[in-house]
Each structure stands twice: as structure tokens, then as C-alpha cells.
Amino acid sequence: MRFVKILSPVAVFMLIGAIAYFALEGIYSIAKGGGPGTSLGYATYALLTGDAVGAETDEPLDPSGRALTDISEIEVLLDKMKADGIGLGNTPYDELQTPKSSTQAAIKGCRRHKPNLRKVQVHLVTRLFHPFKPIMAFWDDERQLDPEVEAFIERYRFSKRAVMNTNKFGDRIT
């Protein structure tokens, strides 16, 4: 019984603290204006540890680094991307969906991966078209990309380069 008397004020204190914290997180989120950023908890942690939150960086795998926000950066490179056989998934650029760049085909009426593929895939950091579907760029593994296209991909890529392989049946190989 004595334990319950001690636990009860502690539980109430923790509940009030949690409610206050979540209210502050909400206010902090609204005050940022809906732009990308970190939580109040992470910002406080970074302040205490000396990490720079939201500082621009050239490290392509850093989520607080640069994000692609200007559609014209893609549009100026469309012809070079098409020449390099690059496909951009989750974008409206149908001109990049060529037989050369595509990873899928209709086989016996079903969409499947093409057989014997070896394509490099990366995700780009952006919310231009779909907030929860990042742009995915893919191209033939042995392809040497145009230097401007290569610089663009390196600047905005979030994921490491992954190579997608398929066997003679179109099944993915790990």
C-alpha cells in the first residue's frame, strides 16, 4: 500500500511531464513553418553535445544535408539523363521511361522485372513530387554517366548506390 502511495505521485509527475513535452514539440514544429528539420528533443540533444543541427553539408548520406527543392535542376539535365539511359522513378518525366532505362516489362500479361538486369539505384533527397516516395534514379551499372548528371546525383543522393540484379527469369538476385 505504501508503494502505491509513492508510485502514484511519480506516475502523475511523469504523465504531466510527457504531456508538457509533447505540447512543446507541437509548438516547436508549428513555429518551424512546416519545413524539414529535427525534433525539439534532437535539437536539445545536439545543443548539449555540440552537434550542428540543420547545418548544410556536402556529405550525401547526411539527412540534414542539401535537399533538391528546385525542379529546374532536373529539367536542365533531362536530355543528358535520357542519353545516359537514366530512369527517374516517382516523377512525371515520362520521356525518361524508355525501353533502355526501364527495369520492368510486361511478361505474359504481368509486370515483372526484366531478365538479366544489372542496374544501379539511388534515392534522391527531395519532396518535390511525392512526400513519402522519394525520387529513385536508376541506370545500367557499366554506364559512365555525364559529369553533370553524376555531380547532380552525388549532390542529392540519400542512399548508397545499390545494384539491382535479376536472373534469366527476372527474379531479383541478392
Image: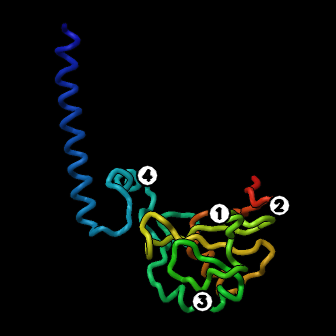
Under mark 2, the amino acid is Lys
Q: Splitting the image into 4 quarters, where does residue 123 fall?
A: bottom right
Measured Cα–Cα span from mark 4 to mark 3:
40 Å
Front-lying residue, 58 or 160: 160
Residue at horizontal 34%, vertical 50%? 41
Measured Cα–Cα span from mark 1 to mark 4:
53 Å
Front-lying residue, 158 or 20: 158
Relative horizontal placement of residue 117, taking residue 80 as reference (left or right): right
Residue mark closest to the camera, 1 vs 4: 1
Residue at horizontal 71%, vertical 69%? 120
Measured Cα–Cα span from mark 3 to mark 2:
33 Å
Residue mark closest to the camera, 3 vs 2: 2
Measured Cα–Cα span from mark 3 to mark 1:
32 Å
Under mark 4, the amino acid is Thr
Q: Percent position (x, y) of residue 171?
A: 74, 56
Q: Which residue is mark 1?
A: 110
Asked which secondary structure carries label 4, the reply is helix
Q: Which residue is mark 4?
A: 49
Q: Which residue is mark 3?
A: 77
Q: Which residue is mark 2?
A: 168
The first of marks 1 and 4 along the sequence is: 4
The first of marks 2 and 1 along the sequence is: 1
* 10 Å crowding of disc 3: few (<14), some (14-19), many (20+): some
